[in-house]
Image (cartoon, coloured by chain):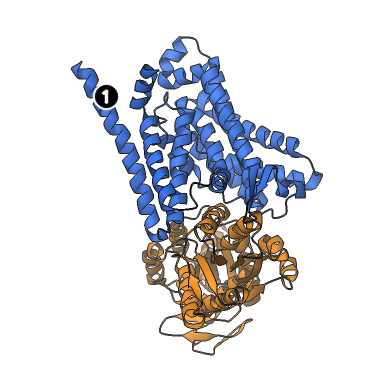
Chain colours: A orange, B blue
Amino acid sequence: MNRRQTLKLLGATAIAGVAGLPNMAFAAAKEMVVVVKIAGIPWFNALEVGVKKAGGEFGINASMVGPSSVDPAQQVKLIEDLIAKKVDVIGLVPLDVKVTEPVLKRAQAAGIKVITHEGPEQEGRDWNVELIDSVVFGEVQMQRLAKEMGEEGEYVVYVGTLTTPLHNIWADSAIAYQKKNYPKMKLAADRFPGADVTDDAYKTTLDVIKAYPNLKGILGFGSQGPIGAGNAVREKKLGKKIAVVGTVLPSQAKSLIDEGIVREGFLWNPTDAGYAMVAVAKLVLDGKEIKDGVEVPGLGKASVDVAKKQIKVEKIMKINKETVDALIAGGL
Amino acid sequence: MPENFARFRRSHEFWLLSVILILVVGLSVMTEGFLTLQNLFDLLTSYAFLGILASGLLVVLISGGIDISFTATASIAQYITMLLANKYGLNWFIVFAMASVVGIALGAINAVLIDRLNISSIIVSIATLNIFYGLLVFITGGKYIYSLPPWFSHGIYWFEYVDADEISYGINLQILALAVMFTLTWLILNRTNIGRQIYALGGNREAAQRLGFNVFRLNILVYCYMGLTAGVASLIQAQLAQSVAPTVLVGKELDVLAAVVLGGASLAGGVGTVFGTILGLTLLAVMQNGLILLGVSSYYSQFFVGLVILLSVSATALSARRKRKGVMTE
C-alpha cells in the first residue's frame, strides 16, 4: 500500500465516520432532564430516585437538576441550558409558572417535549402529571381535621405563600368542603403564609393561639407547616385541645405523630412522582395516544383531561401512627 | 440630665422608640393578647435567632464591613455540632463550644480574604456564602437531622411558670442566649478599647491605619465575632425547630440586615448601637406579631409592615434634615 492509497483509505474512513454519526445518535437513548424546585433536599432526593428508576426501566437517559436556592430565575437558566443541550424531554416542577412560561415555550418551539409536575397552571407544557387530585387532596384532609375536631369549632389554614398555586388550590377546596359539610366549624382568619419554613410556622402558631383562644384545629399545607405548628402546640402543651393535620414528610413528623400532636399527615410519594414524569415522557416519546383511562407503565390507569393537559394517578399517602415507620424505612 | 435627654431626643433611637411605643400602646388597647407576659416570652423566643445574628452583624457594619455569609456559617456549625452530638452524646458546654469554634474558624476565613486580598467585603462574603453552603449541601446531600439528643430537644427552662390556662413559659435557652449575646456585644462596643477602635475603623479607615491601629487584627476580631454569634444562634435555632435542616437558614440574611439597618447602623460604617439594633428588631417583631393578633388578613400584612418601616425611617430622616438646617443657620 503506497502513501496515496493510505490517504484515500483514511479519507474514506473519515467520511464514513461522519456519515455514521447521525445514525448512531439516532440509535442512542433519548435524554430527559427533570428540573426541580431546589436541589439537595430530601423531597427531591426521593424524587430523583424515581426518575432514575424509571429511566433505567424505560431505556431513557433520565436525570435531575435543580437550583441551589428556591429561585424561579435559576430554573429558567437551567432550562435554557437544556435547550442548548438539545435534550428530548424537559421535566419541570415549577416554582413560579409565570416566570418559566416563556422559556418553556422556547423549548417546545425547539421540538422538546415538556412534562410538568405540581404545575396544573403552567403554560408551555405537553402534560402535567399529578399523583393526587388537588380538590380531593384538600377535601380528604378537611375530613380528617373535622373528625379530630368533632365537626365543630374554630380552625386556621396555613399555606407556603399566599401565591403558591397548589397549596392555595388545596386550601380553597378544603375550606369550601367545610362550608358545605360542617356548618359548625369556622375558619377563624384568612389563611396564613409561612408553611414552607418551620420557624415561620412556629411563630405564626404562637400568635394564632393567643389571637384565637378557642382554636381547635390547624390545617397546614406546605411540608413545614404542620411541623412548626406541632412544635408550638407541643411547647404550649395544647396537644389535646388543638388538632394538627396537614402535609408532612414522614421522617420529620415522626415524633409529633407518635405524640399524637400531628393527628395525621397526607402526601404523595415523591419517588412515584419522579417515576410518573418519566413514564409519561415514555408514552409521549413513543407517540402513544393519551386519553382517559390510559395505562401509565408501572403506575396503572390514569384519569386524563386532554383539553387541560392533565394526567392524574390517584396515590394519596397517609402518614399516621400505623404507617409512619414503614414509610421511613422506605427512605422518606 | 436635660442635656443628655436633648441629645437622645435628636437621635435615631428616639424616633424608633416613639414609633414602637405608639404601636405597643395601640396594640395593647386593641387586643387582649398583646401586653401579656406570655406574648413577651413568645416574641423573645421566636426572634432570638435573628437577634443574636443581628448583634454580630452590628459589629461588622460598625467596622465598615458587611458579612452575608453568616447564615451558611450557622448552617455548617449547626450541622457538624448536632451530627457529633448525636454520635457521641456530649453536653451543653461542649456543643456550644464546638459551634462557636466552627463559627469563628469560618469567620477567620472571611477576615483573611477581606483583609489580605483587600477585596470588598460584600463580594467576599457572597462568594463564601456560596462556597460554605454549596459544600454543606454537597457533602450532606441535603439530609435533614430529625432526631436530636433528648437533653438537647428538651432544652433549658428556668423559672418555669404555668398560668391559669395551663400554658407554661419561662426563661428558656433562646432568651438566655439572646440576653448574653446582646450584653456581650454592648460590653465589647462600649466598655473596651477594642470597641472604640472598631468604631474608629468604620468611621475612617485611613485615619485609623495612620494612627497605628492593627487593622488586620481588628478585622479578624470582627468577623470571628460574627462567626461566634452565628454558631450560638445556630444551636438555639436547632433547639427551637427540633431538627437541623441544611437549607432553611440561608435566605434569612436580609431579615437580619434589615433589623440592624432599621436600628440605625450605617452601611457606610462607624455608626450603630446595640440599643438601636434591639429597637429595629423589636419593631419588626411587634409588627408581625401585632398584625396577627389584630386579626389583619395575611393578604394585607406585608403592606402594613412596609408602611411602618417607611414611616419610622422617614421620621428619622426628617429629623436629621432639620438638625442639619439648624446647624447651618446657627
Say above or below: A290 vs B39: below
Residue A206 position in % (x across, y down): 55, 54
Residue beneath the point at 72% across and 38% down: B95
- Looking at the image, residue A298 sits to the left or right of residue A183; the answer is right
Q: Give the residue number, with chain letter if any, for mark 1.
A: B323
Q: In which quarter of the image is residue B279?
A: top left
Quarter containing the C terminus of chain B: top left
* Label 1: which secondary element: helix
Which amino acid, by three-letter code, is at mark 1? Answer: Lys
Quarter containing the N terminus of chain B: top left
Q: Along the line of sight, which residue is nearer the eye, A311 or B213?
A: B213
Q: Along the line of sight, which residue is nearer the eye, A199 or A180?
A: A180
Say above or below: A192 vs B322: below
Residue beneath the point at 63% across and 35% down: B103
Residue B32 position in % (x across, y down): 47, 53
- Looking at the image, residue B142 sits to the left or right of residue B14; the answer is right
Q: Is residue A65 visible?
A: yes
Q: Along the line of sight, which residue is nearer the eye, A188 or A296?
A: A188
Q: Along the line of sight, which residue is nearer the eye, B320 or A151?
A: A151
Residue A262 position in % (x across, y down): 65, 66
- Looking at the image, residue B103 sits to the left or right of residue B35; the answer is right
Residue located farthest toward the left when viewing the structure as drawn: B329
